[in-house]
Image (cartoon, rainbow, N blue to C red):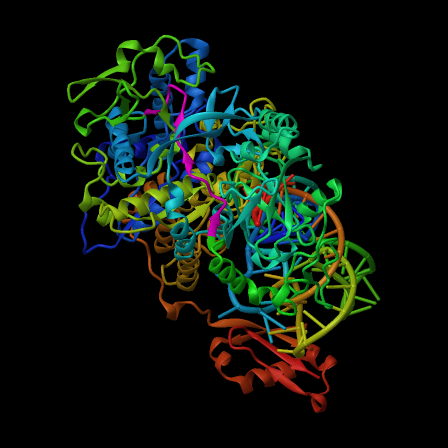
RNA sequence: GCCCGGUUGGCGGAAUUGGUAUACGCGUUCGACUUAAAAUCGAAUGGAGAAAUCCAUAUGAGUUCAAGUCUCAUACCGGGCACCA
């Protein structure tokens, strides 16, 4: 009798899979069903794989192997999201170049992933920091640039004073840098943007077409934040002097129906119009208020909810009433949303109400709260009947909204307008370890894209990676590199690099032809394999998953992709926490190292199976050092079923029902991604076989069903029994036992369990008679008083109602 | 504040269409094997009760022959957004 030695058999099979290239994806073959499965590729940190990666990758692997065993053509690639700040910060500290440090990290990641026995096509490995890869990232940038979707703009940007770089909106969390946690500031800088807002409507509307968790869809919808409303222009009445050259103020509102309730206007401190609205008396006060507001960090601006503001000294005219409206400046109005100016309706907006109360501004009620409203806020912001609204009084606010806009439009001061919360994607970074932006500037500062035949623009080797607050990246220190000749003209290179999210916005298509020298992706390969059928990850709900949808739509519009959504189905996995339920972290010393788990003797099969058994894949789970022992015992029992002597061999016919049931349950559960119950079901099956004995067919079925989870162990058993790994099918006729249990309820309470021939299930009268005849049932039922008897179709149950 | 989730034994969790609540695993207890221990195998394990039986899926109501599952309210926990006009 051989003992189960996971480390020995795992090394054996991993070597076979590597030598035979077992998991190389097949050639595009339209006659075969295809599946393209991938995880969100990892950032290869120096710490190596953690148990969260293992959960993420194993989900992909289970599905990959499930499809492979069903003889589909499966693409399951792997790669590294290799640009990022940790490698650069490491370089600053140690002087070791990011190229060198990340090469070591990748080797480690690759070695560790191979120890987990994943069915990866290793010939398709990609790495975003490889010039062969980022050449095409730069090419993608140039395509966006050519179509006007990559542009430069000078504006106030999030700036992290620790990382010394600007950040995208999506990278600012609670006013803090997503990487280092330091408070961000606003800095006026010229930066590169991708015009994601161009696709705002489609990104919002088509998200319902994909099979993604509702949670992620809602987050993206909220992030895009489409609001329908109107822009309304207010004339300014400066000292009664009607020279016709007064500024005009345009505001955005979702409630044009409340126009009669506007009692003042408010501008954001960043609004340029302010300078034309101040007068000799107010100039100093207003300008110092604006300066102070801009100096404040975003946290400070958010924390102080107490309204502040100053009067500009100017008045606007309400086009609906002709009344004079004081114009104020206040930092509760955001510069980046709408027009950076609002019409204040203090009677019906909480923020305007607070402001009006504080500065003693008039409050004009224009919407009457319906009597049945339960809203008890000080100012009612729902729908209702208009009052004090001229000819519109007495009508419903929701009904006249469009009419009022039409009326304002007729006067030339209004139009309907859709506004989005989402801003354009800020992509330039003042850091070294990112993809260089492939443009240069001539002497006049005009932008010239680097010609495509001069790509890639490579990183210059530098000695000093330390960024500074000059607003230029460390690349600026490479003076020779800076000079470039385009069409005979000497120019200076752009020194900013691209946000790492740009590199991951097209990699799913690169995987389909990863070594293509002539194109970012081969049109035929991408057409066959993409879009990605199953994509698994537990992060980037808005950022990456929104950006890759944006690029997909853009490249579809260029005729380069034959689909408009890159990911059909998204599985969003939960985290694995430390045994104490807290997040694993080095500083807390509660990190579980998956490689240590394997090497301690459990092996990769136990680790993989345990992480699938730990709970529903989409929920967070706490690691348990005891429970993993249970999974190891289970795999041992599987092994001993074949290689041990405790369980007697029986005829294949004996367990035919048991076998067919487990095939059906496993298959159904895999289709609904219920990995934990698959493992539970297989445990139950094995427990049964230990009781009744196992036939060879029973063991083969077990090995086949187990293979997605514990591929090494399963391969060993299948090899020994000379069986293939083709996914087994069940036969409906073998799903029912000869004798089944039927429960009898009286008024819904369980009173008896009957063993009946399965044929009797179809015979309602017989079931009724058997139920009533039961002695315990008779204690609760007077046959004369039976009101009705219910025998549901899908349950082996009789309910007698008395 | 707003928008999503969630709450089932000592613990992780199962219950797919409203139909036997607590599958499976951990832990605990007992037994077999052993000089002994570990490992392994087997049995028991929601609470109360001698038993019949009764009570249990966060709390309170409702719908139904039947509710963990549907409806309404409340509490608590987690996540997302957060002055977006």
Q: Is residue A194 above or below residue A458?
A: below
Question: Can you give x and y, in whole percent of width and height, for residue A542 in the image?
Answer: 46, 42
Q: Is residue A645 visible?
A: no
Residue A175 on image: x %, y %: 58, 31
The N terminus of chain A sits in image quarter: top left
Name which quarter of the figure residue A501 lies in. Answer: top left
Q: Is residue A758 visible?
A: yes
User: Residue A555's quadrant in the figure?
Assistant: top left
Q: Would you say residue A724 sits in the magenta stretch? A: no
The x and y percentages for residue A579 are: 60, 34
In the image, B12 versus A452, the foreground residue is A452
Which residue does the image show at 26% across and 24% down from the upper left? A131
**Residue nearer the viewer, A446 or A724:** A446
**Magenta region, residue range:** A418-436
Q: Position of residue A597 (x, y in %)?
A: 48, 29
Q: Residue at x 22, y 17 (%)?
A: A484
Q: Quadrant of the C terminus of chain A?
A: bottom right
Count numbered badges in the picture.
0
Left or right of A401: which side holds A67?
Answer: left
Give the image quarter of residue A185: top right
Foreground: A163 or A528?
Answer: A163
Residue occupying the far bottom of the picture:
A784
Does residue A256 appear to the left or right of A453 in the view shown?
A: right
- Residue at image position (49%, 35%) is A169
């Amino acid at each position: 009798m051989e003992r189960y030695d996971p480390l020995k058999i795992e090394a054996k099979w991993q070597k076979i899979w590597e030598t035979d290239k077992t998991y190389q994806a097949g050639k595009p073959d339209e006659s075969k069903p295809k599946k393209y499965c991938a995880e969100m590729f990892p950032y290869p940190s120096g710490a190596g794989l953690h148990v969260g990666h293992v959960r993420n990758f194993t989900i992909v692997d289970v599905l990959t192997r499930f499809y492979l065993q069903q003889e589909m053509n499966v693409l399951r690639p792997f790669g590294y999201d290799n640009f990022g700040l940790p490698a650069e910060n490491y370089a600053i500290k140690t002087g070791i170049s990011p190229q060198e440090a990340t090469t070591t990290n990748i080797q480690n990641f690759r070695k560790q992933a191979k120890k987990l026995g994943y069915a990866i096509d290793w010939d398709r490995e990609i790495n975003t920091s490889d010039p062969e890869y980022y050449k095409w990232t730069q090419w993608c940038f140039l395509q966006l640039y050519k179509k006007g979707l990559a542009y430069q703009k000078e504006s106030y940007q999030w700036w992290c004073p620790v990382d010394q770089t600007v950040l995208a909106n999506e990278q600012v969390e609670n006013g803090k840098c997503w990487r280092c946690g330091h408070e961000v500031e606003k800095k006026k800088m010229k930066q590169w943007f991708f015009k994601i807002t161009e696709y705002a409507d489609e990104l919002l509307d088509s998200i319902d077409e994909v099979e993604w968790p509702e949670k992620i869809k809602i987050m993206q919808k909220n992030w895009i934040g489409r609001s329908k409303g109107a822009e309304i222009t207010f004339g300014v009445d400066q000292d009664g002097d009607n020279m016709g050259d007064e500024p005009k103020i345009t505001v955005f509102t979702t409630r044009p129906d409340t126009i009669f309730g506007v009692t003042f206007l408010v501008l954001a401190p960043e609004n340029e119009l302010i300078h034309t609205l101040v007068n000799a008396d107010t100039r100093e006060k207003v300008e110092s208020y604006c300066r102070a507001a801009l100096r404040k960090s975003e946290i400070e601006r958010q924390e102080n909810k107490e309204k502040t503001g100053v009067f500009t000294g100017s008045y606007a005219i309400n086009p609906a009433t002709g009344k004079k409206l004081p114009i104020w400046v206040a930092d509760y109005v955001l510069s980046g949303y709408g027009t950076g100016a609002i019409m204040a309706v203090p009677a019906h907006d909480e923020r305007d109400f607070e402001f009006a109360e504080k500065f003693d501004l008039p409050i004009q009620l224009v919407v009457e709260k319906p009597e049945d409203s339960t809203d008890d806020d000080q100012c009612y912001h729902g729908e209702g009947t208009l009052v004090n609204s001229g000819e519109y009084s007495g009508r419903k606010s929701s009904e006249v909204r469009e009419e009022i806009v039409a009326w304002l439009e007729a006067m030339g001061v209004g139009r309907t307008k859709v506004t989005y919360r989402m801003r354009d994607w800020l992509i330039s970074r003042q850091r070294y370890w990112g993809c260089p932006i492939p443009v240069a500037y001539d002497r006049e500062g005009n932008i010239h894209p680097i010609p495509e035949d001069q790509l890639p623009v490579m990183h210059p080797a530098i000695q000093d990676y330390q960024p500074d607050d000059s607003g230029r990246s460390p690349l600026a220190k490479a003076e020779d590199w800076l000079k470039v000749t385009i069409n005979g003209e000497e120019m200076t290179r752009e020194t900013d690099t691209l946000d790492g999210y740009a590199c991951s916005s097209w990699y799913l298509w690169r995987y389909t032809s990863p070594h293509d020298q002539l194109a970012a992706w081969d049109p035929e390969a991408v057409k066959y394999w993409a879009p990605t059928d199953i994509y698994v990850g537990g992060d980037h709900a808005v950022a990456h998953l929104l950006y890759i949808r944006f690029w997909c739509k853009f490249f579809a519009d260029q005729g380069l992709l034959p689909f408009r959504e890159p990911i059909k189905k998204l599985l969003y996995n939960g985290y694995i926490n430390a045994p104490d339920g807290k997040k694993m972290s080095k500083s807390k010393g509660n990190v579980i190292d998956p490689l240590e788990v394997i090497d301690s003797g459990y092996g990769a099969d136990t680790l993989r199976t345990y992480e699938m058994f730990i709970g529903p894949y989409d929920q967070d789970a706490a690691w348990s050092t005891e429970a993993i022992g249970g999974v190891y015992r289970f795999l041992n029992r599987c092994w001993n079923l074949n290689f041990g002597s405790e369980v007697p061999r029986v005829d294949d016919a004996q367990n035919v029902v048991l076998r067919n049931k487990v095939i059906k349950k496993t298959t159904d559960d895999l289709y609904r991604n219920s990995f934990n119950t698959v493992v539970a079901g297989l445990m139950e099956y094995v427990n049964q076989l230990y009781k009744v004995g196992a036939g060879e067919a029973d063991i083969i079925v077990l090995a086949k069903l187990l293979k997605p989870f514990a591929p090494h162990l399963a391969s060993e058993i299948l090899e020994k029994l000379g069986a293939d790994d083709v996914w087994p099918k069940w036969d409906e006729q073998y799903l029912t036992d000869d004798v089944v249990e039927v429960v009898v309820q009286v008024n819904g309470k369980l009173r008896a369990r009957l063993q009946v021939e399965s044929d009797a299930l179809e015979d309602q009268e017989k079931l009724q008679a058997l139920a009533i005849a039961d002695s315990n049932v008779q204690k609760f039922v007077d046959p004369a008083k039976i009101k009705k008897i219910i025998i549901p179709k899908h349950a082996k149950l009789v309910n007698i109602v008395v």
